[in-house]
Structure formats: structure tokens, C-alpha cells
Image (cartoon, helix red, strand yellow):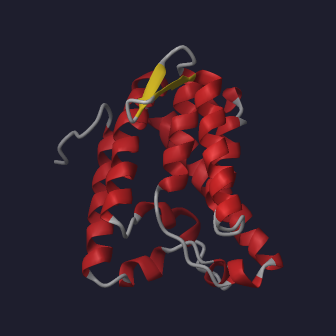
Amino acid sequence: MIPRLGSSKVVSTWILVALSASIIAMASGGRLAAWTALAPERIWHGEVWRLVTWVLIDLSPYTLVITCASIYKFGGDLAPRWGDRRLRRFALHIVIAAGVVTTLGALVSSHAWHMARTGGWAISEALVIAWARQYPSATLRLYGLLELGGRRLIAFTVGFAVLTAIASSPFVMAPELVACFAAAYYPRAWLGR
């Protein structure tokens, strides 16, 4: 039996899978990451599982901790309100949308065509945005400096992703950008049980 790490079985399982897969990927020198990464070239060659598996592996201990903390906090707050089924559906919609749009965008960029991305940054941002939409009057304190809630937290999260895309590359940040916008405009009607 899997121990509960959060408020729901989905949150607990999600954290344990992300931790396990990331540790195995780090210990194997990245071989597992190479097999699960969001790699448009490989997806166009039929490896469609990559549209979902890329968010389960973080190769940096720092980002792994941030991803798991985000799942625990924001997914843990959303699970009792939405239920496991809705939380799982939301996460899958966001991850698949980010993967599909990134893969389609790679058709116009040779740089993006050969990229291979892993990491939970995209889903972490989507969970923050979903949490801010679900709890608009709640606030989140960032590093003890900023208190943001509702629309301001959504704008901050999207703005940070856009700023990072400008500083690096819109194609490199495509999964995060798509995840942010998909979460910000995710139809409330789709959250029905």
C-alpha cells in the first residue's frame, strides 16, 4: 500500500511516481529521461507516450523538490474540492495540450524539432493557476516578500513564464507557456464530475 503524502490518492501516487522516476533517471545517467522526454522528433516517429511522461521526470534535485511541493500544496488543496477524477483529468488535459502544441510548433523550428524536455515546471505553474482560480481570495506568500492571490497570482505566474521565454527561447519554453495559458483559460464546465 502506498503511504499518503497528500490529501488524495492521486496526489500521493503522483508525488511517488515523480520521485521514483526522477531518482531512477538521475541514477541511470538520464537513460530513463531520454526514453520519456518530450521530444517532438520522436513523437512524430510514433512515440506518443512522450506527450504524457515528460512531466514525471526532473533531472535537477532543486526542480524535483519544487515540483513535488507544488503537487503536494496546490494539487493537495484542489483534490478535496474537485475530487481525484477531476484533478487527474485537468492535469492530463494540460500536459497533453502542452505536449501537442510543442510538438506541432517544432514543425516550424529546427531547434525545437531536436529538443528533449523533461520536468514538472509546466504542471507546477498550471496547478498554481488552477489554485488561484479556485481560491481567488486566498493569498500565497512568495519568499516572504510578495503576497499574491487570485488574478494577481495568475498574472505573476504567466508573466514569469513569458519573461523566461523572452530571456531563453519561446520554443524552449513552449510547454510552460501552453500550460500557463491552458490553465488560465481552462473551461470551468470541464471541471464537472
Do we see residue 43 in this rendering? Answer: yes
Q: Is residue 186 above or below residue 139?
A: below
Q: 150 or 33, which lies in front?
A: 150
Please identify the residue farthest to the top as the structure is shown.
137
Quarter of the image where one finds residue 137: top right
Mark yes or no: residue 10 visible: no
Residue nearest the observer in this picture, 173 or 185: 173
Q: Does residue 114 lie above or below 5 as drawn?
A: below
Quadrant, the C terminus: top right
Q: Residue at x 30, y 31 (%)?
A: 7
Residue 90, given in percent of the width and then of the height, sits at: 57, 41
Residue 37 in picture, x, y percent from top left: 51, 74
In the drawing, does residue 119 fall left or right of residue 22?
right
Judged from this view, the residue extending furthest toward the front is 145
Q: Nearer the viewer, residue 52 or 174?
A: 174
Residue 47 image point, x, y percent? 58, 79
Q: Residue furthest right?
A: 108
Q: Residue at x 71, y 71 (%)?
A: 103
Residue 44, given in percent of the width and then of the height, sits at 70, 81
On screen, residue 171 versus residue 31, left or right, reads right
Q: Residue at x 37, y 50 (%)?
A: 66
Q: Nearer the viewer, residue 115 or 77?
A: 115
Q: Is residue 121 left or right of residue 183?
A: left
Residue, x 69% and y 68% (percent of image)?
169
